[in-house]
Image: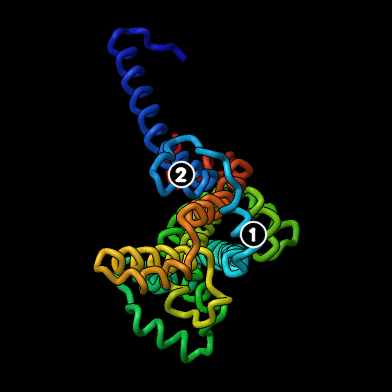
């Protein structure tokens, strides 16, 4: 490959590098600030002296989370279970449905494709979905936040496109060797489609990990709350305490502030909630980069 050494090409390279470095800095600075606050002394946080580096290194916030606040630890475990179970079900149903719908000889295939595409443009609404979940007896259980979102129409369409471009010769050779449809899917198609499968699994997992609205609708027991919903409760209680203090209701504001954790604990909880995704991504990065090319044109 011949590299362009012209002045315009060099200027373009410089502009691209400057833009990307700026984006990286803009992305990293807030994260550094959050991490610094979580490791700083609470008194210094109140004084507003914490910037990008911790001031008077202190682990009291993490001690509070791990040893004193049972709800945060419990909610963290709840989020892990919801993410693992939900992602596994999402990948299972999305890949199997996409593989079936990718076959042109499927009976009533256009009808099923229309049913799969419709949720991308039309939704039944929150109230009918809530009534359906309640009538099925799924309230206050993990199934209430996983079964209603088993398949994303967007990722289903992408996987259908991917499977349609899968070499038919490999499936025919496996069928000649005596493999059935399920064996072909499990032993031939999926092992060669790991890039796409891991990519949709990552997006499904991040969606489950960051979700709180569905849990807020369907969970009644505080012990079942995921981490993101606990974080929401902490932020709302802090906001209410600040509003009451501004209105002069100092006694009531103190009552509310005593129910919640300090600001350092809030940021420490944010750090802990980010860590799982940061730990998982390096192991699936190669699959993720390949999977982002799903649906691209091939020469």
Q: Position of residue 292 (x, y in %)?
A: 47, 44
Q: Name the residue at the top extreme.
A: 6
Of callouts 1 and 2, the N-terminal one: 2
**Comparing labels 1 and 2, the label whose residue is closer to the camera:** 2
Q: Residue at x 44, y 46 (%)?
A: 45
Q: Secondary structure at mark 2?
A: helix
Q: Residue at x 46, y 44 (%)?
A: 44
Q: Position of residue 270 (x, y in %)?
A: 50, 53
Q: Name the residue at the right extreme.
A: 177
Q: Name the residue at the left extreme.
A: 247
Task: Give the vertical position of 27 relative to 266 (above or below).
Answer: above
Task: Give the vertical position of 226 relative to 45 (above or below).
Answer: below
Q: Position of residue 25 (x, y in %)?
A: 40, 32
Q: Secondary structure at mark 1?
A: helix
Q: Position of residue 170 (x, y in %)?
A: 64, 50
For disc 2, the marked residue is: 44
- The numbered mark at residue 66 is 1
Q: CA distance from mark 1 to mark 2?
A: 22 Å
Q: Residue at x 59, y 59 (%)?
A: 65
């Amino acid at each position: 490959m011949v590299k362009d050494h012209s002045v315009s090409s060099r200027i373009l390279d410089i502009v691209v590098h400057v833009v990307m470095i700026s984006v990286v800095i803009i992305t990293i600075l807030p994260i550094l600030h959050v991490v610094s606050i979580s490791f700083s002394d609470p008194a210094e946080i109140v004084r507003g002296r914490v910037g990008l580096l911790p001031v008077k290194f202190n682990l009291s916030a993490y001690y509070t989370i791990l040893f004193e606040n049972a709800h945060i630890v419990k909610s963290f475990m709840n989020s892990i279970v919801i993410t693992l179970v939900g992602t596994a079900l999402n990948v299972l149903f999305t890949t199997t449905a996409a593989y079936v719908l990718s076959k042109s000889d499927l009976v009533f295939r256009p009808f099923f494709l229309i049913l799969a595409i419709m949720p991308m443009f039309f939704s039944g609404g929150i109230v009918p979905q809530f009534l359906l979940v309640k009538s099925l007896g799924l309230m206050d259980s993990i199934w209430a936040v996983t079964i209603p979102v088993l398949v994303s129409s967007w990722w289903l369409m992408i996987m259908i496109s991917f499977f349609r471009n899968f070499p038919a010769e490999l499936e025919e050779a496996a069928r000649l060797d005596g493999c059935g449809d399920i064996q072909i899917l499990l032993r031939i198609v999926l092992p060669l489609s790991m890039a796409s499968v891991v990519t949709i699994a990552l997006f499904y997992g991040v969606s489950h990990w960051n979700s709180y609205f569905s849990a807020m609708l369907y969970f009644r027991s505080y012990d079942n709350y995921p981490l993101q919903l606990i974080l929401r409760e902490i932020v709302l209680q802090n906001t209410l305490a600040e509003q009451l203090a501004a209105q002069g209701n100092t006694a009531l504001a103190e009552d509310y502030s005593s129910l919640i954790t300090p600001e350092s604990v809030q940021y420490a909880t944010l750090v802990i909630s980010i860590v799982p995704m940061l730990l998982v991504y390096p192991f699936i990065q190669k699959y993720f980069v390949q999977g982002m090319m799903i649906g691209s044109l091939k020469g």
